[in-house]
Image (cartoon, coloured by chain):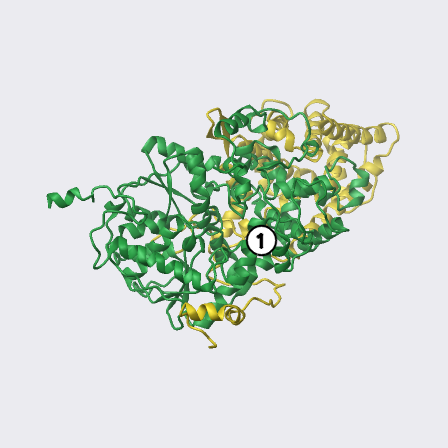
Chain colours: A yellow, B green
Amino acid sequence: MKKIMLPLAMVAVLALVPFIGVQYAGLDYLFGVVIPYAAAALFMAGFVYRMVDWLRRPVPYNITSTCGQEKSLDWIKQDRIESPSKPWHAAVRVLSEVLLFRSLFRNNKAEFRNGPDLAYGSSKWLWLGGLVFHWSMLVIVVRHARFFFAMPPGFVDVLDQMDSFFDITLPAFYITDALVLLAITFLFVRRMADAKMRIISLPTDYFPLFLLGGIVGAGVLMRYIAKVDVMPVKDQMLRLMSFSFDPPGEIGALFYVHLFLVCVLLLYFPFSKLMHMGAIFLSPTRTMLNNSREKMHVNPWRQPMKIRTYAEYEDDYREKMKKAKLPLEKE
Amino acid sequence: MSKYLPKQADLIREMEEKPSPLKGDHAKEEWWEMPVEFREGNFCFAAKPEVIEELGFPNPRKWIATDDDWKLPDGWQKTLMEGMRERIKKYRSLKLYLDSCVRCGACADKCHFFLGTGDPKNMPVLRAELVRSVYRGDFPMVEKILKGFAGSRKLTKEVLREWYMYFYQCTECRRCSVFCPMGIDTAEITIMVREILQLIGLNNNWILAPVANCNRTGNHLGIEPHTFVQNIESLVDDIEELTGVTVNPTFNRKGAEILFITPSGDVFGDPGVYTMMGYMLLFEHIGLDYTISTYASEGGNFGFFTSNDMMRKLNAKMYHEAERLGVKWILGGECGHMWRVVHQYMSTMNGPANFLEEPASPITGTKFTNAKATKMVHIAEFTADLIHNSKLKLDPKRNDHLRTTFHDSCNVARGMGMFEEPRYVLNKVCNSFHEMPENTIREQTFCCGSGSGINAEEYMEMRMKGGFPRANAVSKVKEKHKVNSLVTICAIDRASLPPLMRYWNPGVSVYGLHELVGNALVMQGEKKRTEDLREDPMTGFDDKEDDVD
């Protein structure tokens, strides 16, 4: 399976690069200062570029996908979220996609049986797995604020405590660490096991999964097993946050693996399918209002157009129309 | 029976025995390694040269998809790539939907063509990948560094054959878009690909011949004005014979309050004509001041399946005629894609229609505020309002010989959001209505398998496969509730569902909603009704009752 082995090998090589670089070539400065700055800058520039690139393209037609009753007669109940007619309806629709994966929740599985017959079963695993994956990632990213700020905002602490509710290891075990690894495994396994998923998957689908798996894996190793000293890590992150170019202190090579893979992710992000993070806020079928008969939507590039007019039509058919006693403009 | 229609036993054997990811069989090859095979029954005939010439489209010639040489113009790759780039600039939707798919697979088993054929390239995600793979190759630098990684490919003849095959195995029904967490609408991609394929002369006669007809004569069927009038007058005679009531439609009449436009299939096709009779009975019943145009004599719009410019050009006739006749607003008949166009494109393409008034029912006074810009009202909205205000005298028992279910047309469902009005009307005009299973109705409704201009005779095999999920859902209510009538509000459905039902569910007939309204309407001065509009005997109204009286 080339499309799985190629991205797996890529991530393995990418993980080895900083390990060798720091352990044997003493490239701490490159991997601890230069690359993180470059990656962060390119990520931000790339993300903004992609968003602007989408936004500057016009939306010539109203193409709302209506998944519920339109607003029509007063006594018919409108489905305000699935057939939004006011901006706040659409805002709820989009936010419920972003936060709760509303459309995925509808998912079902079609099963073909001999007969022939089709049956549709409930299928919420993708919704659950996706939700666990994305929310865990978010919590993990927010948790990391304690490395980037000397005094992280209060909610970060609360989140951290909630996440380490099961205080069974030293340092305290994070629930999201386990959840995200489980979710990544699930997302990978379903791409392998399901015949439909296997044929639609591309190397670019496996790569981010392996990359995130590598990042989380290195992080987990650092925290629970190798127990990398966090103080110099935090010092280095605070230095980066204050745009300092001072060299990093003595940190274990495993940290550089973690950091470098994050940098790779940041670089890869704006130019890949991961941009769905921004795209979901712009999808015209979901953001637009189903009010296209109520309010004229303007197409910015509309040009005047020549049509076949009634006059031309009557010219062609006048005799026949006369015989059929149809009223005419010109006798 | 059509020679393009496979024997049912053969088709079932193929569906059951052919390995497919739908049934959990892992494919031995990658999708881009799977060959594209055109054979009788799986493609529509190309547009005739004279049709192409009449429309002024490029590359008129005689060819057929099974030919080795498609007689493509020189530089066709460049034409297609430039056409694609231009549209990516003009449509955010296209760019966004090419960029943002994560291949999560939620759409995979939602397409009726995938469910009916098991062909992996009919999974919406792969249908779009057919284009995405070429689009990604449009960034040569990325591809040079990461060869094979991004899954990109060149626009070869084989890829072109894929496009021509699979973008005509998509009916732009938008069912996949309902399930997509990103809201990606494959219809947007299909519309664009069909549009650029026109640029090099890859097309479909069943779409372009009606387009040319519609432009010239005013309607898809190419009916000239006098014949159009004659045909409606013969329906008037039928109504008189059946009910004893004379209805009086007028044509091209200036000063009428309302212009009524419906698909020409309702004027010429069986069973559409019965729906037309229903409309006319309804208008007579309420004394509506309306007229029918022979120039804007088509509600449907096959331009929608051709290019956005062509859609606009054909649609423009509605406003042009409404303005000439000086009507107040437009009432539209039952049709699927017609209403996608009217609801979502019309005012943007050809508005504002300031010469019209905000539509209000002359009978109930209800203002249709949801149509105040476009000024066009759907007949189901109009009739629902009449019934709600008790303006119709209805005897639903007259439809007791029909045990009904309702097929939501894709465009009206997912491109308009009209679900309740037709159900309300149906429940008021008949006593037996049963919904199909929940994953097959409303926003999850299945296409008839022949939408978006692939209702061609030579495409029968694909249509029976693509329509299978719909037919299968009907079979459930047929078994459980003895349903014998499939009611729709779409002219394409009325043309395409009868053969589908004959094939998969013999004994189920297809009706338009307003045909049932016409059956149920108690008209002033009518004679005793014992037969419905298609001259089938009604239950409980037979002559025996006369003896009892």
Nearer the observer, B72 or A169: B72
Q: Identify the residue position indicated by label 1 in the image.
A: B208
Judge the density around disc 1: few (<14), some (14-19), many (≥20) Cα neighbours within 10 Å: many
- Residue at 25% over, 46% down: B398
Q: Quadrant of residue B286?
A: bottom left
Q: Where is residue A36 in the image (x, y as percent from the top left)?
A: 77, 41
Q: Is residue A269 left or right of residue A322?
A: right
Nearer the observer, A49 or A151: A49
Q: Position of residue B294 (x, y in %)?
A: 45, 64
Q: Is residue B166 above or below residue A65?
A: above
Q: Position of residue A170 (x, y in %)?
A: 64, 23
- Residue at 35% over, 56% down: B235
Q: In which quarter of the image is residue A149?
A: top right
Amino acid at pointer 1: Leu
Nearer the observer, A317 or A128: A317
Q: Is residue B10 left or right of residue B280?
A: right
Q: Residue furthest left?
A: B549
Residue B299 visible at all: yes
Query: How many labels sit on residues?
Result: 1
The chain carrying label 1 is B
Q: Where is residue B433 in the image (x, y as percent from the top left)?
A: 32, 41
Q: Which residue lies furthest to the bottom in this view?
A: A331
